[in-house]
């Protein structure tokens, strides 16, 4: 059996396929993260963490394929924050219920939150401790 190098295999793409691939390439080449590059905030399981969130600018967003289903997209807000005077970015799914709670409280001027994380991976839950 003759072995072919993967780069030598040619497939004729339809115009529709070429169009979306070109569009995706263009977006990948022009899409950059323009926020402050900070370490990612990691919460310890079953431990309360006091987080001070910076609401001075709109949160950046990042969209990528879901780890559980590559056909679905996941959008995360990149939330600049501080824990114990150290700066971090908290990458939070915008459909996580705590995201809405934080925005509602942030609108009233609240910037410091006590947050409890339970679970791991897709079972992760964040709870605002009052």
Image: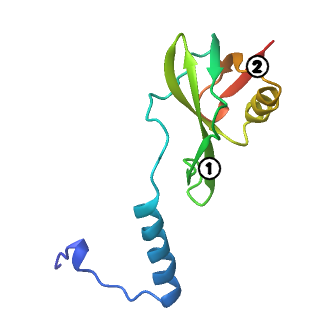
Q: Nearer the viewer, residue 69 or 76?
A: 76
Which type of secondary structure does the marked residue at label 1 adopt?
Answer: strand
**Rendered image quadrant of residue 84:** top right
Q: Picture coordinates of residue 30 (x, y %)? A: 44, 62
Tell me if residue 43 can be seen. Answer: no
Coloration mode: rainbow
Name the image quarter holding the N terminus.
bottom left
Question: Residue at (20%, 73%) from the top-left corner?
Answer: 5
Residue 117, can we see it?
yes
**x 65%, y 32%: residue:** 56
Look at mark 1 in the image and give the residue it sits on. 74
Q: Relative to 110, is 28 on the left or the right? A: left
The quadrant in which residue 43 appears is top right
Spot occupied by residue 7 in the image (x, y as percentages of width and height) = 24, 74
The tag on residue 128 is: 2
Taking depth in this image into account, of 46 and 59 the one nearest to the observer is 59
Question: Could you tell me residue 83's position as x and y percent?
Answer: 56, 15
The residue positioned 70% from the left and 16% from the top of the image is: 112
């Amino acid at each position: 059996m003759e072995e072919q190098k993967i780069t030598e295999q040619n497939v004729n793409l339809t115009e529709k396929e070429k169009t979306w691939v070109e569009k995706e390439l263009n977006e990948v080449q022009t899409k950059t993260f323009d926020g402050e590059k900070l370490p990612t905030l990691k919460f310890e399981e079953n431990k309360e963490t006091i987080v001070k969130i910076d609401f001075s600018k709109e949160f950046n967003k990042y969209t990528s394929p879901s780890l559980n289903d590559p056909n679905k997209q996941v959008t995360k807000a990149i939330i600049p924050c501080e824990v114990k005077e150290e700066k971090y970015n908290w990458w939070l799914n915008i459909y996580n219920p705590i995201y809405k709670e934080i925005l509602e409280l942030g609108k009233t001027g609240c910037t410091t939150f006590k947050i409890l994380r339970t679970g791991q991976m897709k079972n992760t839950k964040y709870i605002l401790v009052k």
